[in-house]
Amino acid sequence: MALSAPATLETKCDRCAIRHVSICGAADFDAQNELNRASHTRTFLAGETITAEGEEPGIVGNVVSGVLRMSKTMADGRQQIVGLLFPSDMFGRVFSHESNFAIEAATDVTLCCFDKPAFERIILKNPQIEHEILLSTLDELDAARDWMMLLGCQTVLERLASFMIIIVHRTFKQNDRHCPAPEPLFLTIPVSRRDMATYLGTTVETISRKIQYMARKKVIRILDPKHFEITNSGQLGRLSGREDLAAAVITQSMLPASHEPARPKLAWFQSGRNASVARPEDAVLNQDGGIRILSR
Amino acid sequence: MALSAPATLETKCDRCAIRHVSICGAADFDAQNELNRASHTRTFLAGETITAEGEEPGIVGNVVSGVLRMSKTMADGRQQIVGLLFPSDMFGRVFSHESNFAIEAATDVTLCCFDKPAFERIILKNPQIEHEILLSTLDELDAARDWMMLLGCQTVLERLASFMIIIVHRTFKQNDRHCPAPEPLFLTIPVSRRDMATYLGTTVETISRKIQYMARKKVIRILDPKHFEITNSGQLGRLSGREDLAAAVITQSMLPASHEPARPKLAWFQSGRNASVARPEDAVLNQDGGIRILSR
DNA sequence: GACCTTCATTGATACGGATCAAGACTTGGG
DNA sequence: CCCAAGTCTTGATCCGTATCAATGAAGGTC
């Protein structure tokens, strides 16, 4: 089988924006060919469902651009987002006949998809890939447990501050390389207030109030509903209630690339193994008249 | 190396109470020998620490008897239990240099321990074992996400009812075999009010109040602080706010063993791959005088 | 451009659960 | 046997956040 892989197909993954940070990067040549042949790109509009709760997931894969949400809904309509997936994160549930949560597009998304049975066969044939999947799953488990602490014993203000720090982390940390973050530090929250509330275990009204509170306290400056400037990152860290971790994240993000820095202790939210891919340029000021941010 | 395994050592695992439900059962003969040689049994008293938060875990393994708690503590002392581990559940974190949470004995426990590096080597040499670990980790991840929903959008009463149902499930479901649960249905909560509160994201006072509330509503009858009779399992399910799942669990537990019943949709809490091992006999009435329960 | 829908904000009020405080009960040690 | 320490329960009060309600701003459609 492996013999028949045409050379032209290789270029598909070669052009992939997340090839260095996703699971694919860990595969050897043959396995990469196999992944390559099995993969296809699909796009979904914000709000579309990739896999419904309880349904057999037909596909698994990576987020290439945009944000996915994983959510669970109770009979009476209450909902919890159990994870947001950013570029390079894997989505879907291998080795199960039904997904325990819905997977939906929180923004317009591009996905690199694999047929689930095919992907499972590839995993079983390549222990090296299976090992990478295991490592990534263990990290996700750590992150989920960190989120349990956040939901179980932190106030909404703390959760919101933590969420913002996480977004900064995902925005400016590129895999192992650290980009020098722009000074001042900008923050783009790619999801709606509703999604933030559903993720943080609260309501849109409370989210709105806490954001305004932060602005009044001059911790952040609101540019528009999705764009902010962090005017006091130290205070933001303090508000998060986990200053130690927060300091590590913000500091890391703001340091220029150094020689092989230790990966910070950050199971915290790091939903995939490697951090994100979103470009700092997106969070930049544009100078005509007032303060504006280029939205995607 | 494999040549030197003396036959006598095999009996160690042969006698193990959880050999059919733990990861060990999935290993082939050679791998089992290897696991056997690497394992040793240790006991800890309630309250003792197996691995401290942030510390390099020296050992991983299975719970043989008793209950472990995994907890995270914030700088100001707030604490969250992110998992309770029952017999047959695995504890410890492979492939990481530090544990993201403390592992402590919630009751007196017996553990089957492996030296972590040795266990990792065995995993890497046996893709079959690694696959089992992956499946079990994926299930734990599903369970953690279910718990996130519980913490994020359920009331304390609902959480408590869910917790009780889970304990029933773990008490009366033996791997694939279903024991006919005694009628009336008894419930032994093996942990303190404090641990319940820390697990359910609330306080001891609230736990106490909600338990008394359930008793007033005749959903349960309190025999002593750790032993209860479930007098209205339907209502308990309704209180949990997830009647569908609850019904599945309670009904499953109460059905006599049938021919190969489908594994219920229950990522919900099922912290390990297979459910528990605690003996129904422990929850049985003893007849001299009043109602009493044999505690371990 | 008028209309509708969705999203974010803001205010008023209500409630669940945390907190503080104290008492009852159990358990182990001298 | 009593005392000390820990556990569980119960009451009174307070606070954070949900809920209800209304308004303004933005985007999409005819």
Image: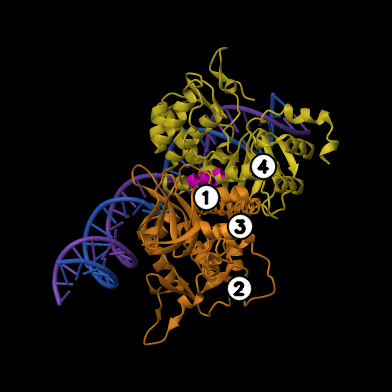
Chain colours: A yellow, B orange, C blue, D purple
Q: Residue at x 62, y 32 (%)?
A: A21
Give the class, few, some or many, for how many residues have Cα within 10 Å of label 4's Cα (few <14, many ≥20): many
- Residue C3, x across and y down, in percent: 69, 34
List the single residue furthest toward the top: A288
List the single residue furthest toward the bottom: B288
- A140, B113: nearer the viewer: B113
Point out the tag, 1 or 2, that comes first from the N-terminus: 1
By secondary structure, the bulk of the magenta-drawn segment is best described as helix
Residue A234 is left or right of residue B235, and the answer is left
- Whether residue A107 is situated above or below residue B135 in the rendered picture: above
How far apart, in angstroms, are the residues tagged by discs 4 and 3? 21 Å
Give the class, few, some or many, for how many residues have Cα within 10 Å of label 1's Cα (few <14, many ≥20): some
Q: Which residue is mark 3?
A: B31
Q: Which residue is mark 2?
A: B178
- Residue A144, x across and y down, in percent: 53, 46
Q: Which residue is mark 4?
A: A129
- Whether residue A54 is situated above or below residue B53 in the rendered picture: below
Q: Secondary structure at mark 4?
A: helix
Specify the subunit that label 2 lies on.
Answer: B
Specify the subunit that label 4 lies on.
Answer: A
Q: Residue at x 71, y 29 (%)?
A: A16
Give amino acid for label 2: His
Residue A64 is left or right of residue A228, and the answer is right
How far apart, in angstroms, are the residues tagged by discs 2 and 4? 36 Å
Do tag 2 and tag 4 residues touch (Cβ < 8 Å)?
Answer: no
How far apart, in angstroms, are the residues tagged by discs 1 and 2? 35 Å
Q: Which residue is mark 1?
A: B118
